[in-house]
Amino acid sequence: SAPFSFAAKYQVIPLPLDILEEIFLNLPPQYVVCVCRLVCRQWKVVADSESFWRERCRRQGYHLRDPSRVASNNWRLFYFLCKKRRNLIKNPRAEDEFQGWKILKNGGDKWTIEGSRAQHSNPAVKKNYVTSYGWCTKEQVINLMKEGYSQSFMDEFQPPIRISDWYGARFDCGSIYRISVQLLDRKKNVLQDFRPQDVTIPQWNDQRWHQMEYVFKDYGPGVRYVRFTHGGKDTQFWAGWFGIRVTESCVEICPALDS
């Protein structure tokens, strides 16, 4: 059968563009893109207009950090990337064993997974990765193009890239925590590197969770991957799993200003 045509089935009454835009602003964004813009030329003009998507961003509180970077005026892309902001790290809470992670070092009695010994600020965190008495490190490399962030978007907008990680130690054993996050170009050469000093937690500590957080800004064009690496070990050289614990790792692309 022939494809459904809204215009063929119903008479489309021309409306002033400002009224049509106001109507579209009250419809789901996916409906505007997938249905409304296919109806007729006038509706397509409104659905594709810079002013429509800029106003939609304004009403939903998506504000550009640097408006001068919208070289291609792609407010529609900016809007949808703001809406789908998410953690790009796979399996951050050890819910699926080591799926998504590449083990780099597996010293001592190797990495393992345990239930959280201390309550996390996020009640959803129930498990964490645990290191041993030798160095244990693991990584994820995030392909930004595959995650929906185009080359033009990354180069023109250069949205801040926020990284976060949670780490803690057993109360009866000291631990060392290490993290490195790198922005890479298409050949995986390092463009920027966040590599703070190792954190040492002493023996007989309060066992609470600590957060490591950093935001990459104004990093220039060319970023195509993010490499996230973390891990550590214990300081007592005890057999078993008395080393640093890590969980709730996060890498986020943040197109809009945080309110």
Image (tube, helix red, strand yellow):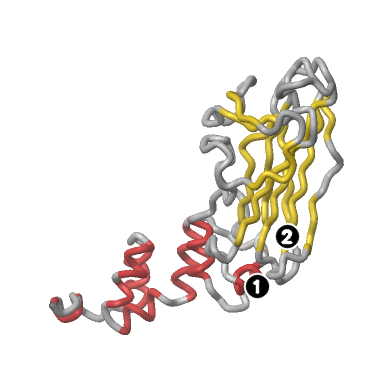
| For discs 2 and 1, the disc positioned in front in the rendered view | 2
Label 2 Cα neighbours within 10 Å, binned few <14 / some 14-19 / many ≥20 = many
Where 120 falls versus 39 (above or below)? above
Residues at discs 2 and 1 in contact (Cβ within 8 Å) = no
Q: Hey, which residue is sitting farthest right in the picture?
A: 197
Q: Residue at x 58, y 51 (%)?
A: 88
Q: Amino acid at mark 2?
A: Leu
Instruction: Answer left or right for 184 relative to 114.
Output: right
Closer to the camera, 221 or 63? Answer: 221
Q: Using the image, tell me which numbered label, if any, was put on residue 197.
A: none
Q: Residue at x 19, y 75 (%)?
A: 6
Residue picked out by circle 1: 156
Q: Residue 126: where, in percent of width, then height?
A: 55, 27
Q: Is residue 95 left or right of residue 23?
A: right
Position in image of residue 237 (x %, y %): 83, 23
At 61% from the left and 63% from the top, the residue drawn is: 64
> Looking at this view, is 55 or 243 the one in front?
243
Can you say whether 60 is above or below 31 in the image?
A: above
Image location (x, y in percent) of residue 181: 74, 51
Instruction: From the viewer's perspective, tell me whether residue 113 is left or right of residue 32.
Output: right
Rounded to the nearest angstrom, the CA distance separating label 2 from label 1 is 16 Å
User: Which of the two residues, 194 or 34, is positioned nearer the viewer here?
Assistant: 194
In the orientation shown, which residue stands out farthest toward the bottom?
41
Q: Secondary structure at mark 2?
A: strand
Query: Residue 200 versus residue 40: which sits nearer the camera?
Result: 200
**Which of the labelled discs sits on residue 183, or is there none?**
2
Residue 119, by quadrant, is top right
Position above or below: 8 against 197: below
